[in-house]
Image (cartoon, helix red, strand yellow):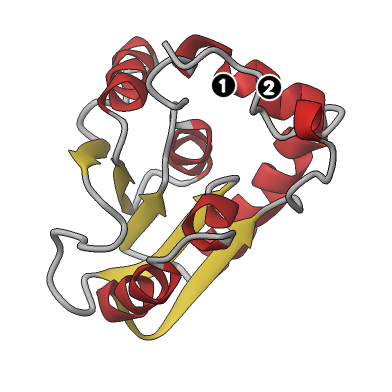
Amino acid sequence: MFEAVPLRYDGINRLMTLGLDQRWRRLAARRILAGTPRHILDLGAGTGDLSLLLASLDENPSITAADFSRPMLDLLQKRTEDAGLRKRIKTVEADAAELPFADSSFDAVGIAFAFRNLLWKNPNREKHLNEILRVLRPGGRFVAVETSQPGRRHLRGEILPAG
């Protein structure tokens, strides 16, 4: 699904949350930045809404945007270039079950609307959680923005075309 919807992904989040996703993301960004982090991981970065917001709110931390979807990262890279933030936001194609970062690499890890994908009915959920803990420095900050998995099939995105 994530290979087919990069251009519609942000609109889908806006629709599913009635526009509240932007407010929730801003609150999460402030929480992430409250710890004055130097290195931030935006896990499941998608099209980069959280990464771009973090970079616009604070010019000091380096931001790594990781996602397993190359089309999502391609759109994120275009958005960072358009915003003049290419040097501030590094994109990395990565599987959340095997993150390509050293232990304790990040002062903060943020995830917006991707945590459910790592946990809900996912046989790798333990690996995902362990990887987040592994790359987060001791005493670091983890912030997740999420909605619950909708019960109605048409709201879960299962009707989106696969390709």
Instruction: Find disc 1 in the rendering and name its residue.
Output: 9
Q: Is residue 77 left or right of residue 120?
A: left
User: Three-letter amino acid code at disc 2?
Assistant: Ile
Query: Can you tell which quarter of the image residue 37 is in?
Result: bottom left
Q: Position of residue 135 (x, y in %)?
A: 27, 73
Residue at the location (68% across, 22% down)?
Answer: 12
Residue at the location (44% across, 27% down)?
Answer: 2
Q: Are marks 2 and 1 in contact (CB under 8 Å)?
A: yes
Query: Can you tell which quarter of the image residue 154 is in?
Result: top right
User: Three-letter amino acid code at disc 1?
Assistant: Tyr
Residue at the location (35% across, 58% down)?
Answer: 40
Depth check: give the residue in front, 150 or 68.
Answer: 150
Q: Position of residue 126 (x, y in %)?
A: 41, 76
Q: Where is residue 128 in the image (x, y as percent from the top left)?
A: 37, 67
Please determine whether, in this image, residue 81 is positioned above or below residue 89.
above
Q: Is residue 110 left or right of residue 81?
A: right
Query: Can you tell which quarter of the image residue 131 is in?
Result: bottom left
Depth check: give the residue in front, 39 or 112.
Answer: 112
Residue situated furthest bottom in the rendering: 138
Which SS class for mark 1? helix
Please determine whether, in this image, residue 61 is positioned above or below residue 135.
above
Instruction: Find disc 2 in the rendering and name its residue.
Output: 12
Please determine whether, in this image, residue 55 is positioned above or below residue 47.
below
Q: Crowdedness of circle 2 by 10 Å Cα count: few (<14), some, many (20+)?
A: some
In the picture, which quadrant includes the C terminus?
A: top left
Q: Position of residue 161 (x, y in %)?
A: 54, 12
Which SS class for mark 2? helix
**Separation of residues labelled 2 and 1 (CA atoms):** 5 Å
Residue at the location (68% across, 52% down)?
Answer: 146
Q: In this view, does 81 lie to the left or right of 123?
A: left
